[in-house]
Amino acid sequence: MKNINILAIESSCDETSASVISDGKILNNIVATQSVHEKYGGVVPELASRAHQQHLIPVVSEALLSSGLKAEDLSAVAVTRGPGLMGSLMVGLSFAKSYAYALGIPLIDVNHMQAHILAHYIDDPKPAFPFICLTVSGGHTQLVLVKSHLDMEVIGETLDDAVGEAFDKTAKLLGLPYPGGPMVDKLAAEGNPLAYTFPLSEMPGLNYSFSGIKTAVLYFLRDQLKNNEDFIKDNLADICASVQYTLIKMLMQKLKRATREHRISQVAIAGGVSANSGLRKELNSLAADLGWKVFIPKFEYCTDNAAMIAMAAHYKFLEGDFCGLDISPIAKMKI
Ligand code: KG4
Ligand code: ZN
């Protein structure tokens, strides 16, 4: 029987990515990062769409070339349908539709958040079902009960900002370049997490709120700068460590509660913020204390990438779950 070869495309935010998967094995993961946003301190949607337009064909060509496969060997084309920036999604989806149409092969639409979770099935060890996944990115913070590859239920989520946004906005207040999350992480490693105290938000059930901490950091810095204009420069590592400590504490409080309420001890993290070294450390230490089995993806598969889209597409292909060529992107697509 012919192999299942899928070309997957990701263009939901500011990474243009393509990946080829063959019979469930990822052959490559080509990512073009858009540096154009750095000087604006955040992703500019219009510029992101234009950059996707420029990068997409070279990225797809590279993925196909390095896979050793020809276009005629492909069984399907997969693409992120949402959630994400409408213009960016549109570039990837329009290309994927045309490519599938030209090759006469099916199109598979993939939910970006589901794909972040399915990144855990790229390499071993793979979590068994059911497990709880804390998905933490620049746009989302969700606790997901994962019942099977394609059956997932959101059991808690942020009611305002995502935790990645809290990292990025803190970084911006500190004058660090975008995206600030990785910089805060690096600086935090050198600082004292208990140097300053920021309030923990109290949300009902398994939900989160991260908008308060951004305001708390803003007022805190404003007050400190009144007395010492070099406050940020002198205390950068301690500020980063203290904010990161607070954000991780909030994430872990609800994660612990979710595992108790659902009687599940298999825990995974996914999304860009799962690259955070403090979060990884805390998760491993909780695993030792509470007897959790913890799954943390490789760095490459934490931030946006097409390999995770390819993995999700593989499971959809096995189910015969294809879509028509008349679909549109869904900016706020739900799991
Ligand atoms: O999943 P992702 O690549 O894109 C979205 O779908 O949003 O996540 C990007 C987010 C950004 O907010 C970025 O600052 C954050 O992930 N991030 C980090 C780290 N690496 C990326 N946050 C904290 N620590 C990191 N090491
Ligand atoms: Zn993402």
Image (spheres, helix red, strand yellow):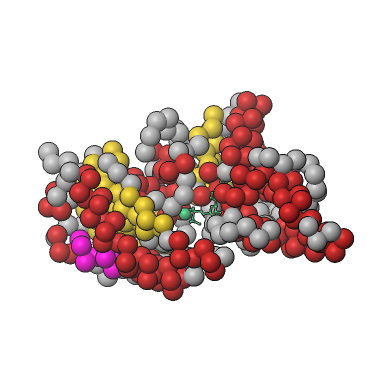
Is 52 above or below relative to 311? Answer: below
| Residue 333 seen | no
Q: Tell me residue 89's x, y (percent).
A: 38, 66
Q: Is residue 172 above or below residue 186?
A: below
Q: Main secondary structure of the magenta part?
A: helix
- Residue 33 place in picture, x, y as percent: 41, 57
Question: Is 313 left, or right, of 333 in this rendering?
Answer: left
Point out residue 297 in the picture as x, y percentages from the top left corner.
47, 39
**Left or right: residue 175 compared with residue 30:** right
Tell whether position 47 is magenta: no
**Quadrant in the rendering for residue 15:** bottom left
Identify the residue shown where x is 57% and y is 43%.
276
* Magenta extent: 92-100
Residue at x 80%, y 48% (from the top left corner): 196
In the image, taking residue 139 as reference, residue 62 lies left or right, namely: left
Q: Position of residue 13 (x, y in %)?
A: 44, 62
Please give the name of the residue rendered at 26% of the width and 61% of the height, measured from the top-left corner: 57
Work out whether 312 lies above or below 48: above
Q: 15 or 143, which lies in front?
A: 15
Horizontally, residue 186 falls left or right of residue 69, namely right
For this orientation, the residue located farthest to the right is: 227
Of the pair 250 and 54, the residue shown nearer to us: 54
